[in-house]
Amino acid sequence: MRTAADLLGIHVCVVRTREASSDPQLPCTRSGIEYRQIETDELVAAVDDSELELDRGFVLDAIDRGDFAFGAFDNDNLIAYSWRSVTCAPHTHDLWVRVRRPYNYAYKSFTRPEYRGQRIIPSLILFSDSVMLESGWTHRVGFIAITNFASLEVGKHIESHVIGLGVFATYFGRCFSFRSKGVVKIGLEFFAPASAS
């Protein structure tokens, strides 16, 4: 699968979803960690921290689209983040993802290396679900490359379930994709933005 992705540009992913809970049980038991939505000024400041891997253009574009960023903080230090979109968001430069209500799309999660292995991202994702639920976004959807075993393991801690597969490739600015029946049913789509052609 990795060879196909590398040589042919064909990517196979597992699509998972979960119904949000207003009172999730967070799997991270570390005390002193606060989960909350990241404010715009905090996001702009975070791009100056190279360890967080946040590109200024990406952050500003996400803010302009109305995407949401949620973070885990340790003594006001941003240690992890995860993004949500209720419309569309980039997976890569030439491949985007579109969702429709009541689904929101979870993407681009990151944890500082020294905090990894503590189930902070699963906790942050579940917390984010509960906040999105307040605005009527009842289900989260995301996808993971079938070869990304570490991220596939996260699904066990956030009680999401597999609804199908997505296969996609982009050539010369065009997106070619296959979505299994369950993925089509919830309205998740892969597409190439006009700027990629």
Image: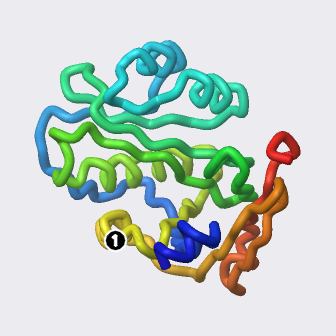
Location of residue 47 with respect to 10 vertically, above or below: above
Front residue of this view, candidates 162 and 148 = 148
Q: Is residue 34 visible?
A: yes
Residue 24 locus on image (x, y percent): 35, 57
Looking at this rendering, what residue extends furthest in the front direction?
A: 7
Q: Residues within 10 Å of mark 1 (few under 14, many from 20)?
A: few
Q: Residue at x 20, y 48 (%)?
A: 116
Front residue of this view, candidates 130 and 99 = 99
Q: Residue at x 14, y 50 (%)?
A: 29
The colouring scheme, among rainbow, by chain, secondary structure or one colour, is rainbow
Looking at this rendering, what residue extends furthest in the bottom direction?
A: 181
Q: Name the amino acid, label 1.
A: Phe
Residue 1 locus on image (x, y percent): 49, 79
Q: Is residue 158 visible?
A: no
Q: Residue at x 59, y 82 (%)?
A: 164
To which residue does mark 1 refer? 149
Location of residue 163 with respect to 124 vertically, above or below: below
Total label count?
A: 1
Front residue of this view, candidates 22 and 140 = 140
Location of residue 129 with respect to 114 vertically, above or below: below
